[in-house]
Image (cartoon, rainbow, N blue to C red):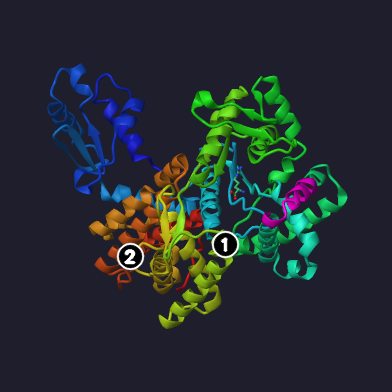
């Protein structure tokens, strides 16, 4: 795609003494207000070298740029040179890119095929997959899609919580009170009930805890009976998780969770030992992190069993060895900030320079309208129930609004799920947010359904325009774009042009909301264009030119939704 900013930097290099185009490129800004131009060049930095007031320099540069074919106009406003790109150039470039690159538009080859591990979702076996898990699942999936679009070779890892002393408790509980049919019918709810019962009973009878410790240690030693039970709990739980993943349209390349590292912990521990990082404390083994203002990291317990952080150290070592990653990303709630700070410090202390390629990407809490949920208080809201309810409610709305679709079930699924995902991704990930039904299913607000609806509106315009016009619109290089005149059309073209920058920035900041907000802007600009201009006119040439912009909108919205993990129905 023609790069205006780069072109401007090269142009300015000829007129600005002492700076090369790369330095200028860094300085060129995109003004907040479009009345201040499409690009602006600040002249403060030049004042010293040129011994002139910045405003004067701006004036001189603006004068020199006059007559450049790229610009509609240039003007000096105080210390800035404001540049306005010719509408025709902006339109042509945006349309050629969005339509020409098709489903690849927005992405690039910047990743060069380098490996990026994206770890997300990572629920705990035999524990509810609840609304709190949606964030890691959906944010992680979007980050994966964005990195893949940027040309990285991503590996999607689900680091299941499938190991630890709680499995000893579950094994004991199952043996005492369990029933195979119940587990098979409703694995997680049943296993959770056993687990809760275990805790109640253990308050009266402390020997249960010892039994559980023993069972876990048998499991760690690979004893056949314990392993078979654990494997079964794991398989049944994954079956349930998979139902949710299928609803969300989410996949993984690896389910290597905590248990996967059970035979890889010895190596990690001996590395820690060789580096002199381990200390004994009350029979347990720790890494002292006081110097860095953190509590000690517990590596093994008194009975020799390993911990969550031990497995994370082993996992990082393994991933570096197995994948040779360029980046290793962890999409995990901000409640685990301390854990990840401790863990990263330990990787650094081990002397691995790739510690800097490991990134914890935290996110804030989700709460429900009637207060924060908590597993303990029994107010757990299962993610699957939320998703099914979203689909059900959307179905009602679709029927009520008499939405144009020949497959209500399919549309209700696409829109209901899309609504939930979009609500997740439209806010800055670090912000806490309140899950609200009314907000997400609104077809008018800044919501998933609104964007899907805009996409469907674009699709419908293309259909109504007729096949010949659609085919011609798909080749914008051959069209007379002077028919597209309105400011709203131009604003829309600019947003399309900037879509790849939004994707890149979202990748750099691990912030899918940048893509989400950008497509909201595009949808709003498109609807403004739709109201301002008569698109399906009788004049064939005019109609085709405008439809070409509509096609570009359709492609960009579809790609943007796709990056977020949301489908784009053709009719709605
Ligand atoms: N299973 C953990 C939980 O549900 C999240 C795992 C996060 N990933 C990691 N590598 N520690 O809290």
Farthest residue, direction front = 204
Q: Earlier in the sequence, mark 1 or mark 2?
A: 1
Few, some or many residues within 10 Å of mark 2 (<14, 14–19, 20+): some
Q: How many numbered circles does the render carry?
A: 2
Label 2 sits on a secondary structure element that is helix
Magenta residues (range): 203-216
| Residue at figure coordinates x 76%, y 51% from the top left | 207
Contact between marks 1 and 2 (CB within 8 A): the answer is: no
Q: Residue at the spot x=17%, y=30% of the render?
A: 58
From the viewer's perspective, is 78 left or right of 270? left
Residue designated by label 1: 248
Q: Position of residue 299 (x, y in %)?
A: 66, 33
Q: Position of residue 94 (x, y in %)?
A: 37, 50
Residue beneath the point at 55% across and 71% down: 388
Which numbered dot is residue 541? 2
Crowding at mark 1 (Cα within 10 Å: few <14, some 14-19, many 20+) = many
Residue closest to the eye, 532 or 343: 343
């Amino acid at each position: 795609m023609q790069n205006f900013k780069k072109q401007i930097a090269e142009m300015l290099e000829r007129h600005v003494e002492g700076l090369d185009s790369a330095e200028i490129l860094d300085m060129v800004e995109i003004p907040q207000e479009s009345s201040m131009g499409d690009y602006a060049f600040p002249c403060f930095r030049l004042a010293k070298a040129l011994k002139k007031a910045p405003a004067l320099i701006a004036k001189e540069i603006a004068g020199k740029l006059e007559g450049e074919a790229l610009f509609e106009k240039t003007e000096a406003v105080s210390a800035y040179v404001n540049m306005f790109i010719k509408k025709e150039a902006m339109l042509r470039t945006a349309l050629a890119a969005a339509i020409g690159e098709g489903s690849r538009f927005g992405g690039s080859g910047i990743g060069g095929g380098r490996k990026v591990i994206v770890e997300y979702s990572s629920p705990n076996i035999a524990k509810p997959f609840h609304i709190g898990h949606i964030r890691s699942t959906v944010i992680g999936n979007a980050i994966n899609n964005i990195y893949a679009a940027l040309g990285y070779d991503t590996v999607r890892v689900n680091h299941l919580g499938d190991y630890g002393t709680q499995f000893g408790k579950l094994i004991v509980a199952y043996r005492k009170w369990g029933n195979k049919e119940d587990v098979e019918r409703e694995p997680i709810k049943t296993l959770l009930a056993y687990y809760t019962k275990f805790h109640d009973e253990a308050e009266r009878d402390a020997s249960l805890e010892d039994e559980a410790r023993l069972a876990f240690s048998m499991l760690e030693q690979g004893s056949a009976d314990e392993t078979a039970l654990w494997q079964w709990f794991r398989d049944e739980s994954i079956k349930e998780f998979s139902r949710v993943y299928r609803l969300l349209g989410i996949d993984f390349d690896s389910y290597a969770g905590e248990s996967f590292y059970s035979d890889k912990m010895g190596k990690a521990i001996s590395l820690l030992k060789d580096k002199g990082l381990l200390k004994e404390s009350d029979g347990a083994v720790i890494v002292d992190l006081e110097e860095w203002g953190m509590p000690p990291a517990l590596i093994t317990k008194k009975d020799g069993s390993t911990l969550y952080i031990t497995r994370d150290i082993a996992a990082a070592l393994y991933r570096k060895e197995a994948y040779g990653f360029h980046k290793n990303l962890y999409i995990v709630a901000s409640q685990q900030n301390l854990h990840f700070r401790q863990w990263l410090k330990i990787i650094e202390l081990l002397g691995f320079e790739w510690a800097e390629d490991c990134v914890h990407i935290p996110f804030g809490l989700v709460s429900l309208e009637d207060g924060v949920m908590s597993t303990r208080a029994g107010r757990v809201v299962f993610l699957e129930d939320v998703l099914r309810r979203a689909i059900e409610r959307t179905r009602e709305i679709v029927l009520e609004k008499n939405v144009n679709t020949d497959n209500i079930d399919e549309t209700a699924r696409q829109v209901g799920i899309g609504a939930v995902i979009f609500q997740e991704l439209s806010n800055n990930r670090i912000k806490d947010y309140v899950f609200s039904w009314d907000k997400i299913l609104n077809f008018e607000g800044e919501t998933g359904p609104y964007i899907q609806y805009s996409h469907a509106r674009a699709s419908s315009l293309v259909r109504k325009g007729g096949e010949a016009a659609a085919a011609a619109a798909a080749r914008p290089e051959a069209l007379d774009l002077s028919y597209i005149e309105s400011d709203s059309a131009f604003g829309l073209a600019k947003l399309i042009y900037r879509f790849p920058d939004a994707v890149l920035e979202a990748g750099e900041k691990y912030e899918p909301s940048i893509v989400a907000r950008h497509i909201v802007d595009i949808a709003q600009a498109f609807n403004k264009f739709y109201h301002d201009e008569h698109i399906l006119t009788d004049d064939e040439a005019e109609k085709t030119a405008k439809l070409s912009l509509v096609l570009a909108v359709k492609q960009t919205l579809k790609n943007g939704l796709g990056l977020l993990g949301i489908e784009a129905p053709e009719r709605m």
